[in-house]
Image: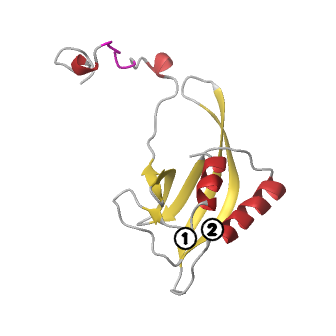
Amino acid sequence: MKLEEFKTALKNLSQIAFELPNGQLVPKHFHVTEVGKVTKDFIDCGGVLRKERVVNFQLWEADDYDHRLNPDKLLNIITIAENVLHISNDEIEVEYQGETIGKYGLEIKGNNFVLTSKVTDCLAKDNCGIAEPAKTENAANACTPGSGCC
């Protein structure tokens, strides 16, 4: 989910709820302790220079169980971050601590913002000898034995 989509959804809510990939909700007394811009410059395994930029939200729980972050306050925080940090309409990445700090994508489902699992991937498969999965016209036969995709 990109920042503008998040802000639009936020304007239509009376309360904020984040849902973990397992379906559990982040406790209602969470804080958004950071709204930032994260830029990553790197070389992939094929030797190509790449740049990745995301808008970062960090969710945190404290012992102040009466705390509730309302949509207007979060929109104000985002506006300050956009102006001071020159944040663009980039994808949102959410940090949330379980056993360790996890990084998640974000989608909306009903009135909840759902933290989605992220995965790693090789960005230079053609240089590493990794074949792309075969694409077929008929989705029903896309993964039949011998098709090379399973």
Q: Position of residue 90 (x, y in %)?
A: 66, 44
Magenta span includes 133: yes
Measured along the vertical axis of the image, is residue 6 above or below residue 15? Answer: above
Image spot of residue 102 (x, y percent)? 47, 58
- The colour scheme used to paint the residues is secondary structure
Quadrant in which residue 20 is drawn: bottom left
What is the magenta range?
132-137
Q: Is residue 12 left or right of residue 139?
A: right
The magenta stretch spans residue 123? no
Depth check: 81 or 45 in front?
Answer: 81
Q: Which of marks 2 and 1 is nearer the N terminus?
A: 1
Quarter of the image for residue 136 reads top left
Q: What element carries label 2?
A: helix
- The rendered magenta stretch, by its main secondary structure, is classed as loop
Residue at left 45%, top 75%?
27
* Residue 67 drawn at (x, y percent): 57, 83
**How many numbered marks appear?**
2
- Give the residue type that dot 1 points to: Gln
In the picture, measured across the screen, residue 53 lies left or right of residue 139, that is right
- Which amino acid, mark 2? Pro
Looking at the rendered image, the quarter that the C terminus falls into is top left
* Point 66% across, 48% down: residue: 4
Using a 10 Å C-alpha cutoff, classify the residue at mark 2 as few (fewer than 14 neighbours), some (14 to 19) or many (20 or more): some
Q: Where is residue 42 in the image (x, y as percent from the top left)?
A: 64, 36
The residue lying at 48 percent from left, 16 percent from top is 126
Q: At numbered mark 1, what does the secondary structure look like: helix, strand or loop?
A: loop
Q: Which residue lies furthest to the right in this view?
A: 84
Q: Which residue corresponds to mark 2?
A: 71
Kindly check if marks 2 and 1 are in contact, taking CB atoms under 8 A apart as contact.
Answer: yes
**What residue is disc 1 on?**
15
Other-residue count near label 1 (Cα within 10 Å), few / some / many at <14 / 14–19 / ≥20: some
Identify which residue, 65 or 124, lies in the foreground. 65
